[in-house]
Amino acid sequence: MAGHASGEWPANVIPLARAAMPVTSEIKVDAGTLELVRQARVLLRQSQLKRRNDFDRACSLIAGDKNTTTERYAAAFFQGLQLFALRRLHVFPAKAVTVSNDEMWLARLFMALSSEDYTSAKYLMALRVAPVGHRRLLFLAERLARILCPTTLPQAASLAGAQGSHP
Protein backbone atom coordinates (compact mmCIF):
# COMPACT_ATOMS: atom_id res chain seq x y z
CA MET A 1 0.00 0.00 0.00
CA ALA A 2 1.22 3.49 -0.73
CA GLY A 3 3.01 5.18 2.11
CA HIS A 4 3.62 2.04 4.14
CA ALA A 5 7.14 0.69 4.41
CA SER A 6 8.13 -2.97 4.12
CA GLY A 7 4.63 -4.27 3.34
CA GLU A 8 3.06 -3.60 6.74
CA TRP A 9 -0.68 -3.19 6.86
CA PRO A 10 -2.37 -0.22 8.60
CA ALA A 11 -4.29 -1.02 11.79
CA ASN A 12 -7.71 -0.64 10.14
CA VAL A 13 -7.00 -3.09 7.25
CA ILE A 14 -7.33 -6.85 7.56
CA PRO A 15 -5.26 -8.52 4.82
CA LEU A 16 -6.72 -11.44 2.91
CA ALA A 17 -4.85 -14.72 3.30
CA ARG A 18 -3.86 -14.69 -0.37
CA ALA A 19 -2.57 -11.11 -0.12
CA ALA A 20 -0.57 -11.88 3.01
CA MET A 21 1.23 -14.85 1.43
CA PRO A 22 4.04 -14.08 -1.01
CA VAL A 23 3.47 -15.49 -4.50
CA THR A 24 6.88 -17.18 -4.65
CA SER A 25 6.99 -18.70 -1.17
CA GLU A 26 8.94 -21.92 -0.81
CA ILE A 27 7.28 -25.11 0.36
CA LYS A 28 9.03 -28.11 1.88
CA VAL A 29 7.54 -31.40 0.70
CA ASP A 30 8.06 -35.14 1.17
CA ALA A 31 10.58 -37.05 -0.95
CA GLY A 32 7.99 -38.52 -3.34
CA THR A 33 6.42 -35.17 -4.15
CA LEU A 34 9.86 -33.57 -4.53
CA GLU A 35 10.86 -36.28 -7.03
CA LEU A 36 7.64 -35.71 -9.00
CA VAL A 37 8.32 -31.96 -9.08
CA ARG A 38 11.94 -32.54 -10.13
CA GLN A 39 10.82 -34.74 -13.02
CA ALA A 40 8.33 -32.06 -14.09
CA ARG A 41 11.09 -29.42 -13.88
CA VAL A 42 13.33 -31.48 -16.17
CA LEU A 43 10.50 -31.97 -18.68
CA LEU A 44 9.76 -28.24 -18.57
CA ARG A 45 13.39 -27.34 -19.26
CA GLN A 46 13.56 -29.85 -22.11
CA SER A 47 10.34 -28.50 -23.60
CA GLN A 48 11.74 -24.97 -23.56
CA LEU A 49 14.42 -26.16 -26.00
CA LYS A 50 11.85 -27.58 -28.44
CA ARG A 51 10.43 -25.75 -31.42
CA ARG A 52 6.98 -24.25 -30.79
CA ASN A 53 4.23 -25.76 -32.92
CA ASP A 54 0.62 -24.85 -33.43
CA PHE A 55 -0.88 -25.96 -30.11
CA ASP A 56 -4.22 -27.16 -31.51
CA ARG A 57 -2.53 -29.16 -34.25
CA ALA A 58 -0.05 -30.66 -31.76
CA CYS A 59 -2.94 -31.82 -29.52
CA SER A 60 -4.72 -33.38 -32.51
CA LEU A 61 -1.60 -35.24 -33.60
CA ILE A 62 -0.90 -36.45 -30.07
CA ALA A 63 -4.49 -37.65 -29.61
CA GLY A 64 -4.29 -39.68 -32.81
CA ASP A 65 -0.91 -41.30 -32.15
CA LYS A 66 -0.72 -43.98 -29.45
CA ASN A 67 3.10 -44.03 -29.59
CA THR A 68 3.62 -40.39 -28.60
CA THR A 69 6.70 -39.86 -26.45
CA THR A 70 6.73 -38.31 -23.00
CA GLU A 71 8.75 -35.40 -24.37
CA ARG A 72 6.04 -34.57 -26.93
CA TYR A 73 3.33 -34.66 -24.26
CA ALA A 74 5.45 -32.46 -22.00
CA ALA A 75 6.31 -29.99 -24.78
CA ALA A 76 2.65 -29.59 -25.72
CA PHE A 77 1.52 -29.39 -22.07
CA PHE A 78 4.03 -26.72 -21.07
CA GLN A 79 3.42 -24.77 -24.29
CA GLY A 80 -0.29 -24.85 -23.45
CA LEU A 81 0.45 -23.63 -19.93
CA GLN A 82 2.36 -20.70 -21.38
CA LEU A 83 -0.54 -19.91 -23.70
CA PHE A 84 -3.43 -20.30 -21.26
CA ALA A 85 -2.03 -19.67 -17.76
CA LEU A 86 -3.78 -16.86 -15.93
CA ARG A 87 -0.41 -15.60 -14.73
CA ARG A 88 3.25 -16.45 -15.16
CA LEU A 89 4.14 -19.63 -13.28
CA HIS A 90 7.25 -19.75 -11.06
CA VAL A 91 9.49 -22.79 -11.37
CA PHE A 92 12.65 -23.37 -9.33
CA PRO A 93 15.85 -24.96 -10.71
CA ALA A 94 15.80 -28.75 -11.09
CA LYS A 95 17.94 -29.47 -8.02
CA ALA A 96 16.15 -27.15 -5.59
CA VAL A 97 15.03 -28.87 -2.37
CA THR A 98 11.89 -26.76 -1.95
CA VAL A 99 9.05 -26.15 -4.37
CA SER A 100 7.14 -23.05 -5.39
CA ASN A 101 3.37 -22.66 -5.04
CA ASP A 102 3.03 -23.19 -8.79
CA GLU A 103 5.10 -26.38 -8.69
CA MET A 104 2.98 -27.64 -5.80
CA TRP A 105 -0.10 -26.90 -7.89
CA LEU A 106 1.38 -28.92 -10.75
CA ALA A 107 2.24 -31.85 -8.44
CA ARG A 108 -1.28 -31.81 -6.97
CA LEU A 109 -2.75 -31.77 -10.48
CA PHE A 110 -0.68 -34.79 -11.52
CA MET A 111 -1.49 -36.65 -8.29
CA ALA A 112 -5.22 -35.94 -8.67
CA LEU A 113 -5.21 -37.20 -12.24
CA SER A 114 -3.17 -40.30 -11.42
CA SER A 115 -5.71 -41.22 -8.72
CA GLU A 116 -8.56 -40.44 -11.15
CA ASP A 117 -9.90 -37.61 -8.99
CA TYR A 118 -11.22 -35.54 -11.89
CA THR A 119 -13.23 -33.14 -9.73
CA SER A 120 -10.06 -32.01 -7.94
CA ALA A 121 -8.15 -31.90 -11.22
CA LYS A 122 -10.76 -29.63 -12.81
CA TYR A 123 -10.74 -27.38 -9.74
CA LEU A 124 -6.94 -27.16 -9.79
CA MET A 125 -6.98 -26.41 -13.51
CA ALA A 126 -9.46 -23.58 -12.94
CA LEU A 127 -7.10 -21.98 -10.41
CA ARG A 128 -4.26 -21.41 -12.88
CA VAL A 129 -5.57 -21.83 -16.45
CA ALA A 130 -8.06 -19.89 -18.58
CA PRO A 131 -11.23 -21.88 -19.35
CA VAL A 132 -10.42 -22.12 -23.05
CA GLY A 133 -7.40 -24.31 -22.26
CA HIS A 134 -8.90 -26.63 -19.63
CA ARG A 135 -9.95 -29.56 -21.81
CA ARG A 136 -6.76 -29.87 -23.85
CA LEU A 137 -4.43 -29.32 -20.90
CA LEU A 138 -6.30 -31.87 -18.78
CA PHE A 139 -5.92 -34.38 -21.63
CA LEU A 140 -2.16 -33.77 -21.80
CA ALA A 141 -1.73 -33.63 -18.01
CA GLU A 142 -3.54 -36.94 -17.56
CA ARG A 143 -1.03 -38.74 -19.77
CA LEU A 144 1.90 -37.02 -18.04
CA ALA A 145 0.43 -38.02 -14.67
CA ARG A 146 0.29 -41.68 -15.77
CA ILE A 147 3.95 -41.47 -16.74
CA LEU A 148 5.24 -39.46 -13.76
CA CYS A 149 3.08 -41.03 -11.00
CA PRO A 150 3.14 -44.75 -11.78
CA THR A 151 3.11 -45.83 -8.10
CA THR A 152 -0.38 -44.48 -7.42
CA LEU A 153 -1.98 -46.09 -10.48
CA PRO A 154 -2.07 -49.69 -9.20
CA GLN A 155 -3.85 -48.48 -6.05
CA ALA A 156 -6.40 -46.54 -8.11
CA ALA A 157 -6.88 -49.49 -10.49
CA SER A 158 -7.38 -51.94 -7.62
CA LEU A 159 -9.91 -49.62 -5.99
CA ALA A 160 -11.80 -49.26 -9.26
CA GLY A 161 -11.70 -53.02 -9.78
CA ALA A 162 -12.95 -53.68 -6.24
CA GLN A 163 -15.80 -51.22 -6.67
CA GLY A 164 -16.75 -52.72 -10.01
CA SER A 165 -16.79 -56.31 -8.71
CA HIS A 166 -19.55 -55.70 -6.17
CA PRO A 167 -23.16 -55.94 -7.42
Image (tube, rainbow, N blue to C red):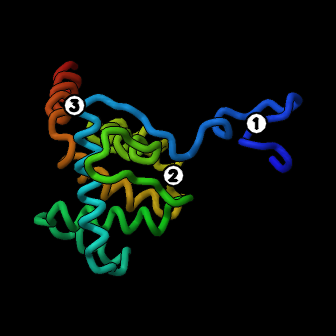
163 over 43 or under it: above or below: above
Residue 63 makes an appearance in the image: no
**Residue indicated by mark 1:** 8
Q: What's the residue at 37%, 74% (across, down)?
A: 55
In terms of sequence position, does the residue under pointer 1 or pointer 3 come before the other?
Answer: 1
Q: What's the residue at 23%, 33% (across, down)?
A: 32
> How would you rate the neighbour count of disc 1 (Cα within 10 Å): few for under 14, some for 14-19, many for 20 or more?
few
Apparent side of residue 59 relative to residue 102 in the rendered image (left or right): left
Q: Nearer the viewer, mark 3 or mark 2?
A: 2
**Residue indicated by mark 2:** 128
**Where on the picture, by quarter, is residue 122?**
top left
In terms of sequence position, does the residue under pointer 1 or pointer 2 come before the other?
Answer: 1
- Quadrant of the image containing the C terminus: top left
Q: Secondary structure at mark 1?
A: loop
**Where on the picture, by quarter, is residue 51?**
bottom left
Q: Amino acid at mark 2?
A: Arg
Apparent side of residue 31 relative to residue 151 in the rendered image (left or right): right
Residue 61 place in picture, x, y as percent: 24, 74
> How would you rate the neighbour count of disc 2 (Cα within 10 Å): few for under 14, some for 14-19, many for 20 or more?
some
**Residue indicated by mark 3:** 156
Q: What's the residue at 30%, 74% (across, down)?
A: 58
